[in-house]
Image (cartoon, rainbow, N blue to C red):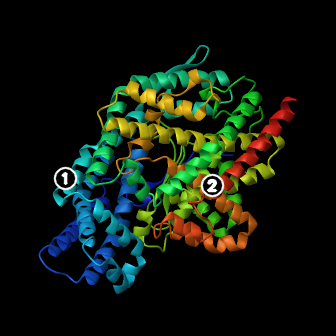
Amino acid sequence: MSTQLPTWDLSQYFPSLQSDEFRAEMQGVKDAIAEGVAAMEAVGTGSPDPIAFVASFLERSKDLNERLGLLYAYIGGHVAVNTRDADAIKAMSELQIAMIPLNQVQTRFTAWIGEQDVEAIIAGSDISKEHEFILRRDKIDATHLMSQAEEDLATELTLSGGSAWGDLQQQVSSQIMVTFEKSPGETVTIPMSDVRNLANDPDREIRRRAFVAEVEAWQQWQTPLAAALNGVKGEHVTLSKKRGWDSVLATSLHQNHIDQETLDAMMSAAREAFPDIHRYWAAKAKAIGVKKLEWFDITSPVGENERAWQWDEAMDFILEQFGSYSPKMRDMVQQAIDENWIDAGPRPGKVDGAFCMGTVPGKSGVLSNFTPSFDGVSTMAHELGHAYHNLCQVDSSPLWGRNTPMTLAETASTFCETILRKAAIQHGTDDEKFAILAGSLVDSGQIIVDITSRFIFEQSVVERRANGLLTAEEFNELMIVAQKETYGDAIEEESLHPYMWAVKSHYYSADYAFYNYPYMFGLLFGLGLYAQYIQDPETFKANYDDLLASTGSADAATLAARFGIDVRSKEFWVSSLDVIRQDIDEFEALVNARTA
């Protein structure tokens, strides 16, 4: 069986960053942007028919959005696997600069829409009707704009502000090499992504040494990373205030197509589930033979017989289980394998973690840092779930895809991950079931408890950042406070991770603040949908792809209502968490049986 991990083939889109084809498309996009700028400027000198102008604007935006999506994916794909790639970094900078006038045009369009009768425009053409949700959001956004000169300046400055700070975090963190004694007499120097992967090692002493080395490495790089986080959060605070939002969080809720009532219902249900997650951690401590878990134990495997999943074996299992849902889902995975959509192997210079990016309609690029464990298989299923979401949107407006919020972007990934996990538990040996259930609960704990800690941390940071810069030590302090509030006494306090603010790239997005709670929404919403799938598979299948295709065309509450779900109701979130509580009950029983 092959253990060779695949690398993605970006040459299927352009031969190279230096190729005539790539340069021609870059120039073509720049020309299209210039045409859009000219069309918008003409509005200021005349009185165009609003219905005709909006229809034309949307048609142009649809085409340009597809072309830009490919360019960003192609260039970003090069950077992601080699953050030292000077040509890719230069090309990304070129594209970002080219985007400045387009972003400025979008702002001017939004401001102009704010002065129009949007309902009449929507009624006036088919394409406007297709994008009614986006146009109505633009109407709201118009009330949160600065002056045109200020918005233009903000668009230009973000390249040397928030976006640049985010790039710094990515480049620094991906290039950190960590030297430590992996075992007595064996000193290794490996990328930070590999060090963090050792948190899944079955040997507790290796996990401990890797954790100590990891924290020491983050400390060595804390100064530039603290500067980056200050820069990004400073931009969030400033722009939110200038645009008249009540808070940075209010901006985030609008971006994610939910309201405060929905967030409060979900977070309240999550907090009520903390004792259950703590109960799971106590059982896990018992399973691995310690009094209480330390941080480096949280994601560790349990038992002595966890199955090692080689790459080909993992993909065969994904193919089989996705196929149990539908031929369409299985065929997409086979296409991903055949056409080299996937880059799976960790290596120096490659970014940590995993993600999926749309490339051209119906296709994606999938990146992971695969480990031969069920966690590695589950992560791949998660990212391929995103690819399935992209596939379902192949005939939808590309503007819907751009408008899909994080809250709904996690729907398909969570659903696919759940399909795989349930199948693995059903078909595995007793030892495999135990390990998989334990691994699933690792994810549940991270989503419910750790995400809440990240949310609390970010709330504290934006409040403090409004009054000045924070030091790395202050970031550490706020992180530990947030972890104590959520992890409680379930984890050894001395082992908490003060540098999680440096680890998680989500904090460094210039475009999105509070890039955390959407993952909780995605997990619990996905579990709720999976429960409906089990109850009535055929009815569910008849509606599910349409839901995924439509995720940028309505708010979360409206889309959820199609499945009879009220996301503003705490009861819905509690019912989703009950699925996790059942897993904890089963895990506790297995641990007690094994340790009796």
* Residue 19 on image: x %, y %: 31, 57
Q: Residue at x 25, y 81 (%)?
A: 50
Tell me the kind of residue under disc 2: Trp
- Spatial distance from mark 2 to mark 1, Cα to Cα? 42 Å
- Decide which of 568, 565 is in the foreground and name it: 568
Classify mark 2: helix, strand or loop.
Answer: helix
| Numbered marks: total | 2
**Quarter residue 492 falls in:** top right
Farthest-out residue, bottom: 124
**Quarter residue 485 falls in:** top right
Classify mark 1: helix, strand or loop.
Answer: helix
Label 2 with label 1: CB-CB less than 8 Å: no
Residue 282 is left or right of residue 28, and the answer is right
Q: Is residue 90 above or below residue 53?
A: above
The mark lying in front, picked from 2 and 1, is 2
Q: Residue at x 47, y 69 (%)?
A: 554
Report if residue 224 is visible in the image. yes
Q: Residue at x 41, y 58 (%)?
A: 254
Residue 495 is left or right of residue 402, and the answer is right
Q: Which residue is mark 1?
A: 153
**Quarter residue 53 falls in:** bottom left
- Decide which of 431, 585 is in the foreground and name it: 585
Determine crowd level at label 1: few under 14, some 14-19, many 20+ residues with C-alpha closer than 10 A. few
* Residue 100 on image: x %, y %: 23, 57
Report if residue 339 is visible in the image. no
Determine crowd level at label 2: few under 14, some 14-19, many 20+ residues with C-alpha closer than 10 A. many
Residue 73 is left or right of residue 516, and the answer is left
Q: Which residue is mark 2?
A: 573
* Residue 390 on image: x %, y %: 51, 64
Tell me the kind of residue under disc 1: Leu
* Residue 31 on image: x %, y %: 22, 67
Quadrant of the image containing the C terminus: top right
